[in-house]
Image (cartoon, rainbow, N blue to C red):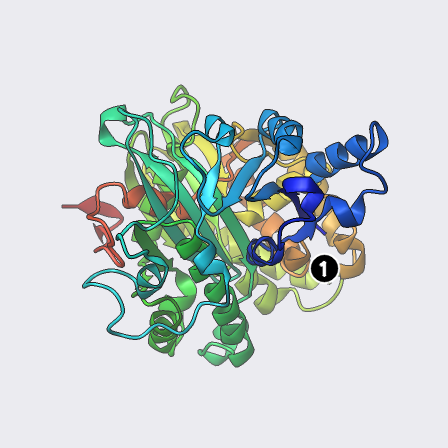
């Protein structure tokens, strides 16, 4: 199981790791404590064990007081590009302020976030932010940005049919220009299958709503702990398509203390296009055709710096799997029906995207990245890396392998996420059909998408904006 490396004074003997364990837990990680895991603190065996643990860790969590014996661990972690989280404040002259660290408010880690009251916080401020605010009004113990490098800490939540994601990031000021990058502080990804059986029943399943509530409670704690100043949560097809989608939005209000938005398909496509294209290293491949293959629908957007045309198609991997791929492995008749449905959806979508023939195809979402990870034998692009390219030949090979595999066999494939096992066949069919239909030999694979677009949308919002008005879309085109 993925872990966080614990770093504290005197090999953890003088600190209580409970806050670190709580932080690791809401990050979806276990905590690796050298005092429990390393057989020896001597050199070289103890150091080698710790180094290997840092190499394999998702992040490093520090608990002050930090002694000099932690210097090599933190220096090594910083050099390896690991995110370093420090629970609580540090003196301004502390040596750790010289490296890239993220401060965490310990008050947010003492217990699970309590249900917010309607009168918590000032007008417009999410209730969970008021819970973590100190008496001096400061939202976090985060180190101030250097002069001339003003950044705004935001939190974005993308609630989809199959998964839900959280991103806390620092956005650059407008003065840095359109090519400036966001700095990702923490990201969490959870498959909760909120759209379970919605196509059949028209309503959200009670167990799916329970899974969503548990995850959102953790997200509230993370947002408070990392001191986000602006927050936005957006729902996609599942909140548009479920008869009780409004009740789910009320649950979000009760759990997070903010109002979630149910995006239209066009709004979803425009935001995803922004998230994808802002992450590109250069714009030499413009124009771009983005395919964001989700659980309930697939968004297509076409443009260069901005999406000029956008359309939402009923091509979601969860819906296709539930409608057509019922046996394990799927029967030939089921495969043919699924492919026919995908082709029909693509024909209709492309009618709304004039000029797509000359565009560079970019794929986003866990459907695309999981197919790519399988094709690349588990070596998916790392956070912060440039997007990779996926060939049609590799996709066709993956589809052939998946169609002949049982769920148990798929679960053992390198790069497979456990929550994608039952929908990966549908995902791969959509990816292959999209490339084939468009006549594209390669697809650029991006780990950015709607989630990052939501975060970028908060850059010009006033502080403590809980639910900004989404851009209006007419016939797939944005209007003021």
| Residue 292 placement (x, y as % from top left) | 46, 46
Instruction: Count all numbered tags in the image, as a single digit.
Output: 1
SS at badge 1: helix
Q: Is residue 352 visible?
A: no
Q: Residue at x 44, y 67 (%)?
A: 113
Residue placed under numbered mark 1 in the picture: 332
Taking 241 as reference, is 392 above or below it?
A: above
Q: Extreme left residue here?
A: 480
Front one among 435 and 247: 247
The answer to whether residue 253 is left or right of residue 414 is left
Taking 385 as reference, is 227 above or below it?
A: below
Q: Residue at x 29, y 45 (%)?
A: 457
| Residue 339 placement (x, y as % from top left) | 59, 54
| Residue 180 placement (x, y as % from top left) | 34, 27
| Residue 199 placement (x, y as % from top left) | 49, 73
Taking 472 as reference, is 378 above or below it?
A: above
Front one among 223 and 147: 147
The answer to whether residue 188 is left or right of residue 223 is right
Q: Is residue 471 visible?
A: yes
Front one among 18 and 367: 18
Front one among 78 and 327: 78
Q: Residue at x 61, y 26 (%)?
A: 75
Q: Residue at x 82, y 28 (%)?
A: 43
In the picture, residue 251 is in which quadrant? bottom left
The answer to whether residue 479 is left or right of residue 189 is left
In the picture, residue 158 is in which quadrant? bottom left
Q: How many C-alpha atoms fall within 10 Å of the one at disc 1: few (<14), some, or many (≥20)?
A: few
């Amino acid at each position: 199981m993925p872990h966080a490396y614990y770093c504290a004074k005197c090999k953890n003997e003088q600190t209580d790791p409970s806050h670190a364990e709580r932080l690791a837990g809401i990050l979806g990680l276990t905590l690796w404590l050298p005092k429990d895991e390393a057989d020896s603190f001597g050199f070289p065996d103890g150091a080698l064990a710790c180094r290997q643990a840092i190499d394999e860790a998702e992040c490093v969590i520090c608990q002050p007081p930090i002694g000099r014996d932690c210097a090599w661990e933190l220096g090594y972690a910083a050099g390896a590009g690991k995110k370093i989280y420090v629970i609580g404040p540090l003196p301004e002259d502390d040596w750790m302020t010289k490296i890239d660290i993220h401060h965490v408010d310990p008050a947010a880690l003492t217990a699970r976030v309590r249900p917010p009251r309607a009168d918590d916080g000032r007008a417009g401020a999410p209730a969970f932010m008021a819970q973590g605010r100190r008496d001096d009004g400061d939202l976090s113990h985060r180190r101030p940005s250097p002069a001339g490098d003003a950044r705004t800490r935001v939190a974005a939540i993308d609630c989809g049919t199959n998964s839900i994601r959280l991103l806390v990031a620092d956005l650059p000021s407008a003065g840095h220009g359109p090519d400036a990058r966001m700095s990702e502080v923490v990201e969490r990804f959870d498959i909760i299958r909120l759209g379970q059986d919605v196509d059949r029943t028209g309503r959200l399943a009670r167990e799916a709503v329970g899974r969503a509530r548990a995850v959102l409670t953790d997200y509230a704690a993370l947002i408070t702990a990392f001191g986000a100043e602006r927050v936005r949560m957006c729902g996609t097809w599942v909140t548009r398509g479920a008869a009780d989608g409004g009740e789910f939005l009320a649950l979000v209000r009760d759990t997070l203390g903010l109002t979630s938005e149910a995006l239209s398909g066009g709004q979803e496509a425009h935001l995803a296009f922004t998230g994808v294209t802002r992450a590109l290293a250069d714009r030499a491949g413009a124009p771009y055709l983005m395919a964001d293959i989700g659980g309930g629908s697939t968004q297509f957007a076409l443009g260069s710096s901005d999406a000029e045309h956008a359309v939402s198609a009923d091509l979601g991997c969860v819906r296709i799997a539930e409608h057509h791929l019922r046996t394990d492995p799927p029967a030939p008749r089921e495969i043919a029906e699924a492919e026919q449905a995908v082709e029909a959806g693509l024909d209709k979508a492309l009618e709304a995207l004039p000029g797509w023939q000359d565009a560079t195809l970019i794929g986003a979402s866990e459907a695309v990245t999981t197919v790519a990870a399988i094709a690349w034998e588990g070596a998916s692009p790392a956070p912060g890396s440039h997007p990779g390219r996926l060939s049609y030949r590799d996709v066709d090979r993956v589809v052939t392998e998946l169609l002949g595999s049982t769920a148990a066999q798929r679960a053992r494939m390198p790069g497979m996420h456990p929550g994608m096992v039952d929908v990966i066949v549908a995902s791969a069919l959509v990816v292959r059909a999209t490339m084939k239909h468009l006549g594209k030999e390669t697809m650029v694979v991006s780990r950015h998408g709607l989630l990052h677009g939501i975060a970028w949308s908060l850059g010009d919002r006033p502080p403590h904006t809980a639910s900004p008005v989404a851009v209006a879309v007419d016939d797939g085109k944005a209007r003021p």
